[in-house]
Amino acid sequence: MGNSNKPLISLEDVSAAYGAKTVLHDISLCILPHDFLGIAGPNGGGKTTLIKLILRLLKPKTGTIAYYRDGQPCDNLFMGYLPQQTTFDHNFPVTVKEVVLSGALNRRPQLHAYNEEEHDRALSLLEKMELGHASETPIGQLSGGERQRALLARALMCQPEVLILDEPNTFFDIKARTWMLNELKALQKECTIIMVSHDLRDLFSVTNHIAYIHRHLHIYDTAATSVGELENDIIQSNCM
């Protein structure tokens, strides 16, 4: 979509490392307001590292990362993050609504009680995620797919300028996956979306651009590239 030529996030000549191991090499990337960027690549190729850099969970080894609001430099952006689910404590004593409300902490003092507007927004988001019936249910009692929808509601609670999702369709069947992709495409009107996925067809169905990371970064315009063309490029790069 990208309704402005002015960037929202700019990475210039960024490299990242864990100890002596360099994972990303000289990455340059410009993300526009209301863009929908897909991130793909092999395991260990640097997808999660790129997400951590954008979220400021990791400092670059070299290069710069800059953020902009309305075309002007700013210190940070409001970001919602849906991590890839790996493990979860099913006995953790917190309700679904409480989990969603915690997403508001990005925009407010943590020690203050949640106000009526925040409670209403949490319930509205749960209804949107088709979880209104489960607001007082312990989070550990949800299925994997329901929990993923609850965590998406949490990521949206801060009214993010950037929504970052790491394999959001984990635990989803085909029907739920289609629902999720449609919801994300609609959300693009409200914020910039960055989505990591191993499924190129999912990415092509919703994104404007795909950043393929394998040693280095290559950008593909999904309107001008087919899934087959990208798959052929991937095969060739893996043979180099």
Image (spheres, helix red, strand yellow):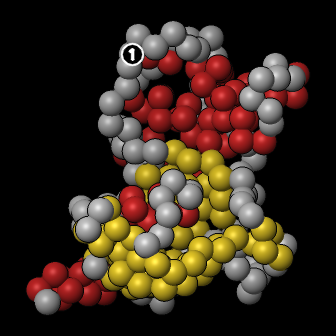
Give the x, y percent position of residue 181.
51, 54
Q: Nearer the viewer, residue 151 or 93?
A: 93
Above or below 117: residue 8: below
In-image side of 162 versus 113 (left or right): left
Q: Secondary structure at mark 1?
A: loop
Task: State the residue at coordinates (34%, 68%).
Answer: 17
In-image side of 230 versus 7 (left or right): left
Q: Quadrant of residue 102?
A: top right
Task: State the residue at coordinates (41%, 10%).
Answer: 91
The residue indicated by pointer 1 is: 90
Give the x, y percent position of residue 114.
81, 22
Give the x, y percent position of residue 158.
73, 42
Give the x, y percent position of residue 169.
41, 47
Quadrant holding the N terminus: bottom right
Above or below 141: residue 41: below
Task: State the residue at coordinates (32%, 37%).
Answer: 86
In-image side of 130 versus 89 (left or right): right
Q: Is residue 204 visible?
A: no
Give the residue furthest to the right.
116
Task: State the residue at coordinates (58%, 14%).
Answer: 95
Mark 1 is surrounded, within 10 Å at the Cα level, by few (under 14), some (14 to 19) or many (20 or more) other residues, namely few
Three-letter code for the amino acid on which mark 1 is drawn: His
The tally of labels here is: 1
Give the residue furthest to the front.
20
Q: Is residue 151 visible?
A: yes
